[in-house]
Image: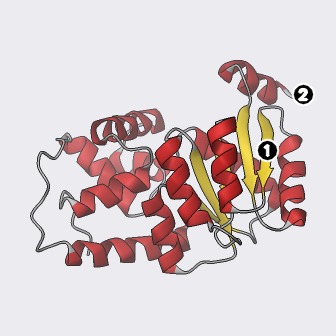
Amino acid sequence: MTQSDEARVSGRGEPIRVLIVDDHALIRRSLELALAAEADIEVVGEASDGQEAVELSDRLLPDVVLMDVRMPRQGGIDATRQIKASVPSTRIIMLTVSDEEEDLFEAIKAGATGYLLKDVQIDEVPDAVRGVHEGQSLINPAMAAKLISEFANMSRKEAERPPQLPVPRLTDREMEVLRLVAKGMNNREIAKQLFISENTVKNHVRNILDKLQLHSRMEAVVYAVRERMLEIT
């Protein structure tokens, strides 16, 4: 075990518990092998469809779920919605061949924290798991651009609907951070833009999520657009 591995394990006290969900056994096996090599990650189960994923999540309470989008019996987006309802603390990464805007947006609305295409390098998956477990959103720049486009469409559609009160009040700085999150920026980019540290950005994001009672950055953006706290054009 390397020193960094030891630090991660000792810092958390126990490994990140991961559930792998995919209807292809070969993909499940590849993901398991990539994650099993990491000292701070433990694969606690596998499922071949969304229905099985929901059942296992209720029983195993995973920290992170790697979820395929399209599967027999029940797809990943419906399963994500059910898992987030029953185990809200679980972070879900959609792992899929689909880069369609509709799938991406529906996954985020369902509560997914990340969205990876299956052409991602397998050795990037452990860091993706760590990232979402630490509260980061995981969407590549091209897909973030598509998501921003969907936010803009949603903002226009919601323009006639009166906001639901009361809307939690965010500070001016928190609103600045949320606007940059909505543009697809990560913590490092936000820190550079606002001339503050990454840790300060993380604290602002944590405060935003606490105030809005949400679990991910993208959920916060969806909420803010819906409640007309943000306008995205």
Residue drawn at (70%, 34%), measured in percent from left and top? 16
Left or right relative to 77: residue 205: left
Q: Residue 48 appears in which quarter of the rendering?
A: bottom right
Left or right relative to 221: residue 145: right
Image quadrant in which the N terminus is located: top right
Q: Secondary structure at mark 1?
A: strand
Location of residue 187 in the rendering, given as x and y in whole percent from the top left corner: 47, 47
Tell me the distance, in whole angstroms, between the alpha carbons under discs 1 and 2. Answer: 23 Å
Residue drawn at (9%, 64%), measured in percent from left and top? 162
For marks 1 and 2 on the same chain, the one whose residue lies earlier in the sequence: 2
Q: Mark 1 = which residue?
A: 45
Location of residue 81 in the rendering, given as x and y in whole percent from the top left corner: 50, 57
Q: Nearer the viewer, residue 31 or 119?
A: 31
Q: Amino acid at mark 1?
A: Gly
Q: Nearer the viewer, residue 159 or 70?
A: 70
Q: Nearer the viewer, residue 101 or 54?
A: 54
Residue drawn at (64%, 36%), measured in percent from left and top? 61
Image quadrant in which the C terminus is located: bottom left
Q: Amino acid at mark 2?
A: Met
Left or right relative to 176: residue 42: right
Q: Mark 2 = which residue?
A: 1
Mark 2 Cα-neighbour bin, 10 Å: few <14, some 14–19, many ≥20: few
